[in-house]
């Protein structure tokens, strides 16, 4: 966490409240201890309040002078020696710098206080030593409070982020499922099936088999974050079989995938999103056939089709947006979508789990 992020968590108002309370508390303890021990006896309540006011102001100045170096120290230690992995190294180093910061500020504040109201020659050395010890103990407490405060805020923020991600994941799953059980796709498929039953019963049986394969795959993978490329290609063949029954020779496709990529993974139903987009948004007829290429390039799955857009209908882009979000949940890699020379090209990163690339379940 950067210093800017830490400072945004510990806002000036919250920091001021903390340091004022700490300064008053420390001064009350010091003043009462000195009075009861006979080191510095108070003569009246007015004397008490003047000492408390003077001491609190000096302590508050010291607290701000200490706090910001402390925050820089915490940020630096978080970067070079995080608690989770370098606790034995961090404790002595951070403790040493905490005491050093306190000692330097104690010397400055004591010298400033001596300039305002000089101590006696006999007291000056003991005052410096006492204040260094007090400031060291107080600064250790301050650093511990800062660490606990930052940890609490980070934990709370992480929980909120996890809740948001879970909500977003649930929404994505719902949108994906809704898009797969598309009423238009069902309606068109049933219409095609109805015609086949009358004309070609063997092809109708094959149609039903491929249709069931599609929805079995949907049900099996909807709760899964990833699937293998080989399974996606099996799904793709069933999906395009149904589409080719509907469009005939007006829809053609080719597949050229390197064999070594078949075990690699990607979000399930990624291919369906791209194929559906190609068919949904382009004219597909005998005079304007749609050609889809599915190939691999540099560990990417590439889906490319010629562009011949339909006049009616605007794309919301929801399917592609959800696809990008699903990639973000499992990898730092992102899909890309481009249009070049009247060709629409989608590139989906393929993830090799053997290389320990990020996969979040």
Image (cartoon, grey):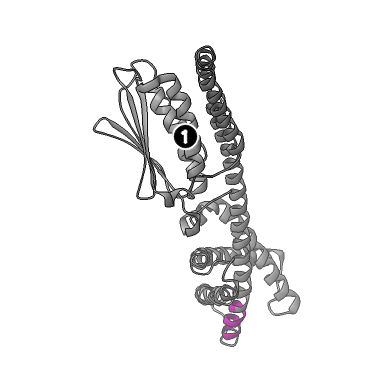
Q: Is 130 inside the magenta-drawn segment?
A: yes
Q: Nearer the viewer, residue 30 or 217?
A: 217
Residue located 46% across and 48% down the image = 262
In the image, 284: left or right of 273?
Answer: left
- Residue 183, given in percent of the width and then of the height, sits at 54, 19
**Residue in the image at 53% along x and 25% along y:** 206
Taking depth in this image into account, of 307 and 166 the one nearest to the observer is 307
Answer whether residue 284 is visible to the viewer in this image: yes
Q: Position of residue 177 (x, y in %)?
A: 57, 30
* Residue 149 position within the rendered picture, expressed as x and y whole percent measured from the top left: 62, 57
The magenta stretch spans residue 286? no
* Mark 1 surroundings: few (<14), some (14-19) or many (≥20) residues within 10 A: some
Reply above or below: 75 against 302: below
Instruction: Find numbered disc 1 in the image and state the secondary structure of the residue it sits on.
Output: helix
Residue 141 position by quadrant: bottom right
* In the image: residue 275, left or right of residue 175: left
Residue 1 in sight here: no
Position of 248 relative to 79 (above/below) = above
List the single residue furthest toward the left.
341
Q: Which residue is mark 1?
A: 236
Q: Which residues are magenta?
A: 124-132
Main secondary structure of the magenta stretch: helix
**What percent of the width, then of the height, locates residue 346?**
37, 37
49 sits left or right of 58 in the view: right
């Amino acid at each position: 966490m950067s210093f800017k992020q830490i400072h945004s968590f510990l806002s000036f108002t919250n920091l001021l409240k903390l340091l004022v309370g700490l300064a008053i508390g420390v001064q009350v303890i010091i003043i009462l201890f000195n009075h009861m021990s006979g080191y510095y006896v108070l003569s009246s309540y007015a004397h008490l309040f003047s000492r408390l006011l003077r001491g609190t102001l000096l302590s508050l100045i010291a607290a701000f002078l200490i706090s910001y170096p402390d925050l820089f120290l915490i940020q630096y230690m978080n970067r070079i020696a995080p608690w989770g992995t370098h606790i034995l190294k961090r404790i002595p180093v951070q403790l040493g710098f905490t005491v050093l910061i306190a000692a330097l500020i104690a010397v400055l504040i004591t010298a400033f206080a001596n300039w305002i109201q000089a101590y006696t020659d006999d007291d000056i050395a003991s005052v410096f030593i006492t204040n260094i010890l007090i400031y060291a103990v107080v600064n250790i407490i301050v650093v511990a409070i800062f660490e606990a405060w930052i940890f609490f805020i980070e934990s709370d923020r992480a929980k909120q982020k996890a809740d948001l991600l879970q909500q977003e994941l649930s929404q994505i799953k719902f949108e994906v499922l809704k898009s797969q059980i598309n009423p238009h796709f069902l309606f068109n498929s049933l219409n095609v099936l109805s015609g086949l039953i009358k004309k070609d019963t063997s092809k109708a049986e094959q149609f039903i088999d491929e249709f069931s394969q599609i929805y079995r795959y949907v049900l099996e993978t909807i709760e899964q974050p990833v699937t293998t490329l080989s399974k996606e290609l099996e799904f793709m063949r069933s999906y395009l079989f149904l589409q080719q029954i509907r469009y005939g020779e007006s829809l053609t496709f080719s597949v050229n995938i390197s064999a070594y990529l078949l075990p690699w993974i990607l979000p399930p139903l990624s291919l369906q999103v791209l194929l559906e987009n190609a068919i949904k948004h382009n004219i597909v007829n005998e005079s304007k056939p749609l050609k889809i290429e599915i190939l691999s390039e540099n560990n990417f799955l590439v889906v490319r089709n010629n562009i011949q857009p339909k006049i009616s209908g605007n794309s919301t882009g929801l399917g592609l947006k959800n696809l990008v979000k699903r990639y973000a949940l499992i990898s730092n890699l992102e899909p890309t979508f481009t249009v070049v020379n009247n060709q629409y090209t989608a590139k989906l990163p393929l993830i090799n789990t053997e290389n320990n690339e990020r996969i979040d379940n």
